[in-house]
């Protein structure tokens, strides 16, 4: 099991753990994919990744908002999650139920997310359904980890960041450069 988590607040240097190396990207990115994330900037940062998977192997899970409706109008498989998620236990439980149903019915091979809170149930439940997980930290948080990254990183098989400076915030990360 790949164990990830944020490092202390004083930004300790990146720790290398030979027994806990991140999974190779080509090993994780194959098969049926769920792109799970909030609408807006989170969704926009995942859109460039569509070229890695054919349309019939992609499922999008996001919020039904104007920008998401426009961005995903040509996608074959879109599932609308419940929002708002900030401080809403009701919607967290509703999204957990949705995640359970979708993971059980569709059995994705990989779940990719840039956050936010909607991703957490998918990352937790991924272990029960054998799905690999990839978390990509958002590009606009360079000095501290996001709450969703802190919650999802222990369940992430691959932790990606968009800036080299973000590598100090998490263990075993790969810097991929900005997606936008």
Image (cartoon, rainbow, N blue to C red):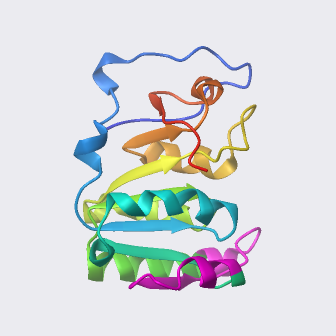
Q: Residue at x 52, y 63 (%)?
A: 47
Query: In the figure, 60 relative to 16: above or below?
Result: below
Residue range in magenta is: 67-92
**Dividing the picture into quarters, in which one does residue 143 lie?**
top right
Camera-side residue of 11 and 113:
113
Q: Position of residue 88 (x, y in %)?
A: 73, 75
Q: Residue at x 75, y 68 (%)?
A: 86
Q: Position of residue 36 (x, y in %)?
A: 50, 67
Camera-side residue of 79 and 95:
79
Q: Residue at x 49, y 49 (%)?
A: 135
Query: In the figure, 11 relative to 120: above or below?
Result: above
Camera-side residue of 148 and 80:
80
Camera-side residue of 145 and 160:
160
The answer to whether residue 124 is seen in the rendering is no
Where's the N terminus, which quadrant? top left
Query: In the figure, 172 relative to 157: above or below?
Result: above
Residue 68 in the magenta stretch? The answer is yes
């Amino acid at each position: 099991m790949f164990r990830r988590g944020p490092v202390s607040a004083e930004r300790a240097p990146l720790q290398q753990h030979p027994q806990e190396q991140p999974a190779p990207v080509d090993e994780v990115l194959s098969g049926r994919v769920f792109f799970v994330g909030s609408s807006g900037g989170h969704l926009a940062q995942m859109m460039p990744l569509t070229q890695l998977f054919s349309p019939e192997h992609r499922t999008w899970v996001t919020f039904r908002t104007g920008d998401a409706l426009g961005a995903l109008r040509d996608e074959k498989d879109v599932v609308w999650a419940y929002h708002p998620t900030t401080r809403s236990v009701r919607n967290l439980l509703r999204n957990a139920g949705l995640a359970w149903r979708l993971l059980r019915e569709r059995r994705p091979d990989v779940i990719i997310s840039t956050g936010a809170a909607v991703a957490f149930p998918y990352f937790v439940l991924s272990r029960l359904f054998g799905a690999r997980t990839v978390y990509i930290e958002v590009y606009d948080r360079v000095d501290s980890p996001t709450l969703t990254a802190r919650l999802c990183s222990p369940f992430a098989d691959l932790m990606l960041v968009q800036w080299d400076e973000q590598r100090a915030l998490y263990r075993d990360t790969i810097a991929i450069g900005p997606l936008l």
